Image (cartoon, grey):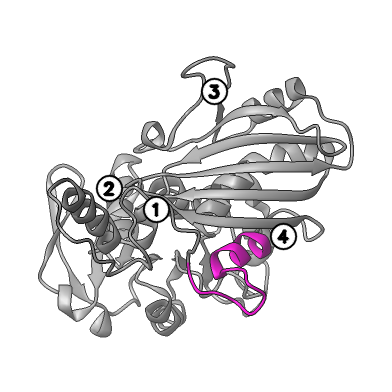
Amino acid sequence: MAYTVAVVGASGNVGREILSILSERQFPVDRVHAVASSRSVGQEVSFGEDKILKIEDLAHFDFSSVDVALFSPGGAVSAKYAPIAAAAGAIVIDNTSHFRMDPDCPLVVPEVNADALLDWAKKDGRKNIIANPNCSTIQLVVALKPLHEAAGIRRVVASTYQSVSGAGKDAMDELFRQTRGVYVNEPVQPEHLTKEIAFNAIPHIDKFMDDGTTKEEWKMAVETKKILDPSIRLTATCVRVPVFISHAVAANVEFERPLSVEQARQVLSDQEGCVVVDYRQDEGYVTPKEAAGEDMVYVSRIREDITAENALAFWCVADNLRKGAALNAVQIAEKLIELEII
């Protein structure tokens, strides 16, 4: 069986990546619509190596013939149009943060909690909307799942090193311009990020909340609870770094029961979607640049944390545009087919 798919936000970084991944993974497509705002209408985007799609206007698009709508247009746009698409009969997989904490919308990483899709499918009068988690949350929970099953996670302290692509194409362009400007002695003026990003690190992603955390840090905590276990306590410091693609997370994890480094390596190696590259020597770890363009979550630097009882530390990296967004959304659609929900 083949499906009609709409990619909403097709002119953006994630939308283009979704189109690429649909083609790469040979998703059973009958027809694909590239959809975006009116300012992008008529632009052309690639689907596979030999197909060009013209962008259609979201404001006037008819979702009634669409089976799956993959949304990545920004939270405000999703808030307005995802319910319209869902009411027309499409199953919406939304990449924005708008529906993530909605109790009627499952928050899914297929390798971690695919069962949430089965529970959602059984609900009468369900919302036809599935939420894609935050990019850093996705890669972290892929690593945390087998550790939680093995020893029970009590607390996680996470520090993120997030690439500028997480803030969109404009932020990527800003990093490029600022880096060039430094070398040619031009004045650097932040436009899309709060401070200069070239040769710098900015401990501020999303808006500040009343308690001093940022919205990005809050997302990681509450999304991990919803996906894995509400009893897990997580605190995060989220930092934007001058890297174009891929996020990294350094995590310290405290467990209910002892878990050795060797046991952790084994369960992480067995985890779907996870690759352990952990050698205690030069180049014995994976960096964000090496993870760019890849589909897996890479875990390195696994070691005992001697400052707490039953604790380990590790480093994980993943391509935030792929596993952190577009790939995870497509994998959800694939899982819906596998589970015979669509």
Q: Position of residue 204 (x, y in %)?
A: 49, 64
The amino acid at mark 3 is Val
Give left or right: position of 224 versus 88: right
Q: Is residue 136 above or below residue 289?
A: below
Name the residue that disc number 1 marks: 326
Tell which tag, 1 or 4, sits nearer the viewer: 4
Mark number displayed over residue 225: 4
Number of other residues with Cα within 10 Å of mark 2, as a class: few under 14, some 14 to 19, many 20 or more: many
Q: Is residue 281 magenta?
A: no
* Distance in Å between CA atoms under marks 1 and 3: 24 Å
User: Which structural element holds mark 1?
Assistant: helix
Name the residue that disc number 2 marks: 20
User: Which structural element holds mark 3?
Assistant: loop
Number of other residues with Cα within 10 Å of mark 1, as a class: few under 14, some 14 to 19, many 20 or more: many
Q: Earlier in the sequence, mark 2 or mark 1?
A: 2
Q: Which residues are magenta?
A: 206-223
Q: Is residue 334 visible?
A: no
The amino acid at mark 1 is Ala
* In-front residue for pair 79/88: 79
